Image (cartoon, rainbow, N blue to C red):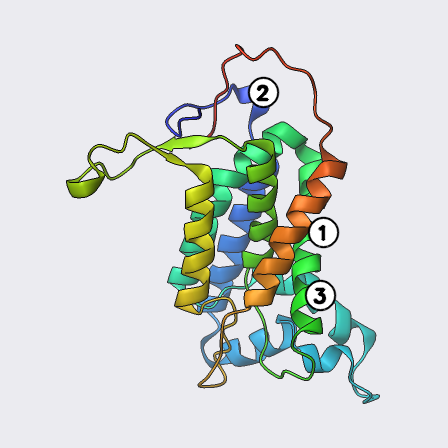
Amino acid sequence: MSKLSTSRSLSSFPIVNITLIALNILIFLHEESLGESIYYFINTFGLIPAKVFSFSSDVGLSERFFPFLSSMFIHGDWVHIIGNMIFLYIFGSNVEIKMGHLKYLVFYILCGLAAALFHVLTNLGALIPMIGASGAISGVLGAYITLFPISQFQNPVPIFFLKDIKFIPAAAIIFLWLVIQFLNGIGTIDKSVDTGGVAFWAHIGGFVAGLIFVRFFYKQKHEFEGKPGRHYH
């Protein structure tokens, strides 16, 4: 059982996860300062599937492949980035502590790349840029549910019909995350067009990648079961 109200010692500070969150926020604040130039920014650094397999000689290698990385640090609005960063903070910090700093960074990037590739392969020819850290975070959720399969969080809203529920399974929260991503339609946001959609397959691809990659980035150790576990809030 894990509570969100406790924390690990300073020696286990999740520096990589905090840095990722800070970087995402700084880039978003930069986006907010661009004004009308935000359209160019998103179309340049967002991942456009049609460009990846374009036969046009005008599309260079950097335009085809750099967005696989850059797109996961761009967000469409405040709801988009706040939702993503909250989940990354809660789940990513614990995965980093369990996995190790450098391994976690590589793992996070690989999950983001896998999610982007899955999106491209299921949306060949699409002209709408895909942006957001959702794919990489989905990978983190996949790792979390593998590393902490019976983890529970203290109920943050013990009111009305929820008052008798003291703890909520992590699996339920992760499922809620996937539902929210699907319903809100914030996985793919292009400010230069009027329509967009959820990068649903990017989330699925990232989650599956997380389930697979975590087994290579963390080797299960035999730990004393009575040892108290503390999770970041």
**Quarter occupied by residue 133:** bottom right
| Marker count (numbered) | 3
Which residue type does callout 3 highlight?
Leu
Q: Spatial distance from mark 1 to mark 2, Cα to Cα?
A: 26 Å
Q: Nearer the viewer, mark 1 or mark 2?
A: 1
Q: Spatial distance from mark 2 to mark 3, Cα to Cα?
A: 35 Å
| Residue 58 placement (x, y as % from top left) | 80, 88
- Determine which of the numbered discs, if any, sits on residue 117 in the image: 3
**Quarter occupied by residue 98:** top right
User: Which residue is at 65% across, 72% downward?
Assistant: 47
Quadrant in which the C terminus is drawn: top left
| Residue 175 placement (x, y as % from top left) | 45, 50
Which residue type does callout 2 highlight?
Ser
| Residue 209 placement (x, y as % from top left) | 68, 51
105 w.r.t. 113: above or below = above
User: Who comes first in sequence, dot 2 or dot 3?
Assistant: 2
- Determine which of the numbered discs, if any, sits on residue 110 in the image: 1
- Determine which of the numbered discs, if any, sits on residue 11 in the image: 2
User: Who comes first in sequence, dot 1 or dot 2?
Assistant: 2
182 w.r.t. 14: above or below = below
Residue 108 can be seen in this image: no
Task: State the residue in front, 150 or 42.
Answer: 150
* SS for callout 1: helix
Which residue type does callout 1 highlight?
Leu
7 w.r.t. 93: above or below = above
